[in-house]
Image: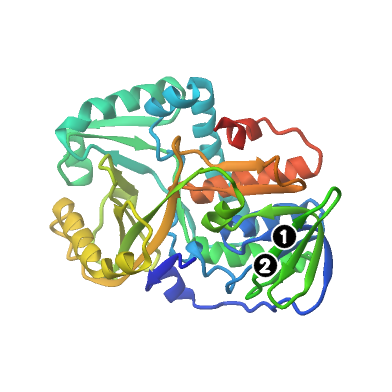
Amino acid sequence: MNLISGYPYFLMKSGLPFTYPTLEKDIKTDVAIIGGGISGALMGYYLTNAGINTTIVDSRTIGLGSTSASTSLLQYEIDTPLSELKEKVGLKNAVFAYKQCEYAIYQLQKIAHKLHFKEFELKESLYFADSLKDEKFLKREFNIRKQQGFEVSYLDKAALKKTYGFAAPGAILSKAGAQTSAYDLTHALIQHAQKKGMKIFDRTEITGIKHHKESITLKSEKGYIITAKKLVYANGYEAIKYIDKKIVDLHSTYATISEQFNDSTEFWKDECLIWNTADPYLYMRTTKDRRILVGGRDVNFYDINKRDKLINKKAALLVKDFKTIFPGIDFKKEFNWTGTFGSTKDGLPFIGSYKKLPNSFFALGFGGNGITFSLLAAEIITDIITGIKNEEENIFSFNRI
């Protein structure tokens, strides 16, 4: 599956920082992970730290799937607003899911600190009403978050204009948020786990999987066999072919990033994450080398040719969207790209076991919360494999559909 196209900024910036071998012999491992993006990297990090013999295998070069195209905004807000999610899964489960995503942000910060990974910054998140008709919804969303203990404040039109310099009917300012580079973090996690004994094989396509009573065998395109006690599918949208029911819709999203600004250029207050209530929503962030990244303008299809032909047009529209909000900032786009993402009916991920595939687990963090969902998946699945009961499994399980 062709997941990205164009010139993803984080890939352009970092290139290929490390190399990994292809599989050229039969091996045995306790846990095999299919997928070398951020989901597989976090999974490998947790399992290896738990003392489990782990192997990652990917058909691409490590990180070159959807992870390389990630814009890497970390938010506890799920694509389905809390005021709507409670109607789908109940208030208790909805709040728990939101709280877990909030927890995941701070847990990722701790991991980044342990790895001495510098490209991780806590940021506030500003969620503003795209139009006057969204003001009522935004206040309802603010009220339920406030009631459930989230650290939020509401800015009316005047306060928003005074503090952030742009006009909108209102906004929710959330304390919990962060930004990173999913691509660079993936390599940092894998490097750490590799030093502790994890094996990594990229450019190794798995063409056959057999689930046995006590084990699993994976066959590579060159005929080599990986024998594992457990298997984790962490290959995102490519894993859906193993599920015999529809769990996700595929879409295409777009992003553009500016040229570097001078140190004297002023951005918005605290350079917080900014996004809006539009559908699809617009979002923006800054980078450590003083660029502005803008994303959105999603389309409801996955067609490689159609998707790629729209890159330049969508990038121009994203620049226009940005300048509507901040006309005083001279945004000159430098790199544009597109990527595939998935959405579920309730906005929640699919994490855990799937009965028809014994001895296997899925770490599928679909939607805008892919990185935080991946952290939760790594913790949940590691707990299950090591025999620890994890209450999150039921909320994110396949049993809900």
- Decide if residue 223 is on the left or right side of residue 145: right
Instruction: Identify the residue under disc 1.
Output: 209
Classify 10 Å Cα crowding around label 1: few (below 14), some (14-19), many (20 and above): some
Q: How is the image coloured?
A: rainbow
Instruction: Identify the residue under disc 2.
Output: 206
User: Is residue 206 visible from the viewing direction of this image?
Assistant: yes
The residue positioned 24% from the left and 65% from the top of the image is 315
Looking at the image, is 115 positioned above or below residue 276? below
Residue 67: image location, x then y, percent: 50, 62
Looking at the image, is 238 positioned above or below residue 304? above
Q: Amino acid at mark 2?
A: Ile
Residue 208: image location, x then y, percent: 70, 64
Contact (Cβ within 8 Å) of mark 2 with mark 1: yes
Q: Amino acid at mark 1?
A: Ile
Residue 363: image location, x then y, percent: 61, 49
Name the image quarter holding residue 337. bottom left
